[in-house]
Amino acid sequence: MSGALVGIDVGTSAVKGLAIDADGTVLASAEAGYPLSTPRVGWAEQDPRDWWEAAESVIGRLRASTGRPAGIGLSGQMHGLVALDSQDRPLRPAILWNDQRTAVECAEIEATIGLERLIALTGNRALPGFTAPKLLWLRRHEPDVYGALARVALPKDYVRLRLCGAHATDVSDASGTLLLDVAARRWSGEVLSALELDPGLLPAVLESPAAAGVTADGIAVAAGAGDQAAGALGVGVDGPGPLSVALGTSGVVFAALAQFAADPDARLHAFCHAVPNAWHLMGVMLSAAGSLRWLRDVTAPGIG
């Protein structure tokens, strides 16, 4: 292999990048931050163009240190709704994973599809952080924006779109939209039809190692993974056995599965893993209040 492998993570506070060699030795690192907007209580938004500017800066600095990359991989914050027009321009700020405005839409999704069927298809119940409730919120509260909507992207996938022109995502990140048939690893026609959402808005879904596109100067860009699946791979959780624990803006316990197995009560997220034909379960806590509810419901159901 000639040239470094570059990994780019589109996080909630910054784009972080590493250049490594074929053996995994870190050759260079770079980071560029950006602001978080909270225009109302419970809302969390960012300008997707800030992600791209930060990614350009990070890739440029890594390239200056290590030369032309042999390939680029992407990971990033999950669930965010990037609404794009027909020219791939953002129609509004992205609504992030930690935004809490969609309680009404979550209830609507579960009532429309049925909780049991929703869990069977998507591995999850409707939660405000997921992408599908955000789409319904946009349709209800910002009809002009929704009417101009031509494409929907997840955060890392907007950076990919700018990087190589490919409108694509990977199965692990797509699992967090509440629109994926997680067992079948493809968009769920049943969910999209029930919610009256146009499948043409959605990106192509690829396995994480697949090449999603090529930059203008011929560098392959991998489909990549959502941040938790990518992080789990980084610490060796690529199959059943070991668990990983991540404590940051959110708290996550991650376990890989050899086959799809949703928690019937949706206490744990069931997603596709970044490993082809593998899945994973996650216990996730977004806040102190969420942590207490999770402890009550999962670890100590007798606590009142």
Image (tube, rainbow, N blue to C red):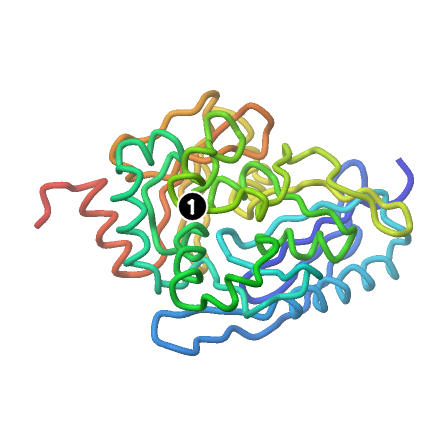
Q: Nearer the viewer, residue 167 or 78?
A: 167
Q: Is residue 256 visible?
A: yes
**Residue 282 lies in quadrant:** top left
Residue that mark 1 sits on: 196
The answer to whether residue 242 is seen in the rendering is no
Q: Who's the residue at 68% across and 68% down the image?
A: 32
Give the residue furthest to the bottom: 39
Q: Identify the residue shown where x is 48% and y is 61%.
A: 96
Q: How many marks?
A: 1
Q: Is residue 208 left or right of residue 290?
A: right
| Disc 1 crowd, CA 10 A, few/some/many (<14, 14-19, 20+) | few
Q: Could you tell me the amino acid type at mark 1?
A: Glu
Q: Quadrant of the N terminus?
A: top right
Left or right of 226, for residue 294 = left
x and y percentages locating residue 131 in the rendered image: 45, 52
Residue drawn at the location 45% of the way across and 68% of the way down: 142
Residue placed farthest to the top in the image? Answer: 258
Query: Which quarter of the figure has residue 159?
Result: bottom right
From the viewer's perspective, is 173 left or right of 100?
A: right
In x, y percent, where is residue 155? 59, 56
Of 28 and 113, which appears nearest the observer? Answer: 113
Q: Picture coordinates of residue 87 (x, y %)?
A: 71, 61
- For mark 1, give the secondary structure: loop
Up/down of 98 relative to 92, above or below: above
**Percent position of residue 132, x then y:** 43, 50
